[in-house]
Amino acid sequence: MKIAVCVKQVPDTWAEKKLKSDDSTLDRESAEGVLNELDEYAVEEALRLIEAHGGEVVVVSMGPERAGETVRKALSMGADAGIHVVDDNLRGSDALATSAVLAKALEGRGFDLIIFGSESTDARMSVVPAMVAERLGIPQVTFSQKVEVEGSTVRAERVTEYGFDTVEAALPAVVSVVEKINEPRYPSFKGIMAAKKKPVETLALAELGIEPTAVGLAGAWTAVADFAERPPKAAGTIVTDEGEGGARIADYLVEQKFI
Amino acid sequence: MAEILVVVDHAEGAVKKVTLELLTLARSLGEPSAVWLGSGASADALASLAEYGAQTVYVAEGSDLDEFVVAPKTEVLAQLVAEKSPAAVLLASSAEGKEIAGRLAVKTNSGVITDAVAVEPDFTATQSVFGGAVVVHSRVNTGTPIITVRPNSTAPEPAAAAGARVDVAVNVSDAAKGAKVTGRTVAQKGGRPELSEAAIVVSGGRGVGGAEGFGVVEALADSLGAAVGASRAATDAGWYPHQFQVGQTGKTVSPQLYIANGISGAIQHRAGMQTSKTIVVVNKDPEAPIFELADFGVVGDLFAVVPQLTDEIGKRRG
Ligand SMILES: Cc1cc2nc3c(=O)[nH]c(=O)nc-3n(C[C@H](O)[C@H](O)[C@H](O)COP(=O)(O)OP(=O)(O)OC[C@H]3O[C@@H](n4cnc5c(N)ncnc54)[C@H](O)[C@@H]3O)c2cc1C
Ligand SMILES: Nc1ncnc2c1ncn2[C@@H]1O[C@H](COP(=O)(O)O)[C@@H](O)[C@H]1O
């Protein structure tokens, strides 16, 4: 089985994220870049499927030069090879452009499964997996909390508002996974050393046959008009319970007209 | 006036409150038409759409829309967009609403904006990003603006309109029938308001100590007519069902009032509740980061504070 995992480099979860004043894009230099933590579950699930069925895991990432670190991180967890789409014209790409680039990078390589995280912690849209499925014209099995492959069929539990649906699709298919699906492994020392020698193919837009004007800030289907940092929240009232804590909250709720 | 398509969010034949909010919002942008995708379009459901301003209700029924994941709904919606050339398409910012929006954007070569909290008459959308730290105004500059809007962003106001039912033919391609739903598991629901739509949410975390501990959280929620939420620590431990998890990988809530009990305030939890209008905290650790968000906080044992609060609410209401 041949599995692709799409991973994104995002600013460290705990770092304060900023937009740049000149072009309203995310300031990716000011914070340390990490592998989107939700994509770690996608890598883990791919590795488990390969351990059970045999095959190969290829990580695919679109992002600036240093997103190469993120590809290596996934390789150090155990993935076999990487594809890194890097091109200056990609800066400021929105979900339409990202999904178009990923679809082109994935197409025609014979992947049976393409696994995504459920959300990137910076963009937080949860739309790229569905959009890639739409572009490739293959089934979409997203928000999975359990994934099984049997022959040429993938079966999954798709988390819904009310519980979960059991979903079945023929391969090739797009899958996205939620964090309750597994516990991602830490890269071992051996894994980190091995990752250095694993092949990573670097692709520019021209090699994917995409016009530079079709992506990035220039080609974006949406544009930021303006943005403002919200003034920090005024400090609230904090009291220590001395036997009347509950009543104090009730007073507050009355004052605020909740009761 | 320009037609605005509002995709109806419904469950078990009932229209969700967020749809009434979207119709209210759509009236400030143009003339709303509701789009019902899937089975269960009862007369009552359609009447509520008319009551909140839908001039037309397009109804696309057929088992294909229920039995396959997302793609068939998008196909029908894309056909409607091609036929009607609406000024915009509004959807609820649920997981499925966002997926439909994303696929529709690809099909119609249009820009998509998710998680808007407001939309201006010129279709400029307001988003609250990075956990509410930054407010962004964005616009779609190609195609039909496709915008998903968070629940609780607009107060729903009735304004009766014709609500004329127009049935839409459902012809789903084989390609869109790739992911088949073979089973549906509905977790226990209970009589409380739905988490993502509730005006008040009362949640519990690891500090609740166990499944039984959630009794005090539920009692408080019921005294306020609130929904119950939980941190991941609580859902992972099996103390409360997963679908009540609030946060990055759970539900995003933005209620009028959020009461956090025994929750430390990890960044992943905050991501799902930070935009709540008023936040009340009960935690025995004065250093817990959740206090940074509190409008009112009590440092104390939740097993003392919460039951007293529930009692006091009863007394003051009584
Ligand atoms: C990929 C990923 C996704 C995640 N997604 C989510 C998510 O969606 N939602 C989420 O919530 N978390 C999420 N998390 C987990 C998150 O990082 C925290 O681990 C979690 O939120 C902690 O839950 P907690 O606050 O209940 O527990 P803790 O951090 O253990 O805090 C418990 C608090 O209870 C207090 N306490 C204990 N006893 C009492 C008492 N008797 N009275 C009063 N206070 C008491 C303690 O002082 C403490 O502050 C995610 C993590 C990862 C890695
Ligand atoms: N630039 C990117 N490169 C590779 N994968 C990506 C990229 N952006 C998003 N993804 C994938 O799409 C998922 C959802 O992202 P999003 O729709 O931005 O929330 C992520 O968890 C990744 O698996």
Image: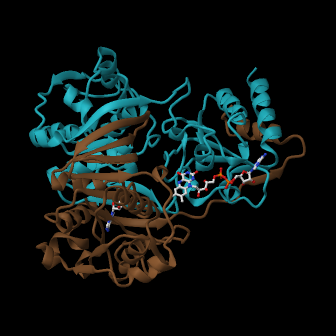
Q: Choose top left, top right, bottom left or bottom right for residue B178.
A: top left
Outermost residue to the top? B43
Residue at figure coordinates x 66%, y 31% from the top left: B218
Residue B237 shown left or right of residue A37 in the figure: right
Question: In the rendering, what colour is chain B?
Answer: cyan
Location of residue A250 with respect to A17 vertically, above or below: above
Location of residue B221 with respect to A10 vertically, above or below: above
| B188 vs B286, nearest the viewer | B188
Q: Choose top left, top right, bottom left or bottom right for residue B267.
A: bottom right
The chain assigned the colour brown in the figure is A
Residue A62 shown left or right of residue B318 in the figure: left
- Tell me which colouring the rendered structure shows: by chain
**Which image quarter holds the C terminus of chain B?**
top right
The answer to whether one can see residue A21 in this image is: no
Location of residue A241 with respect to B18 vertically, above or below: below
Residue at figure coordinates x 40%, y 38% from the top left: A160
Q: Position of residue A89 (x, y in %)?
A: 23, 78
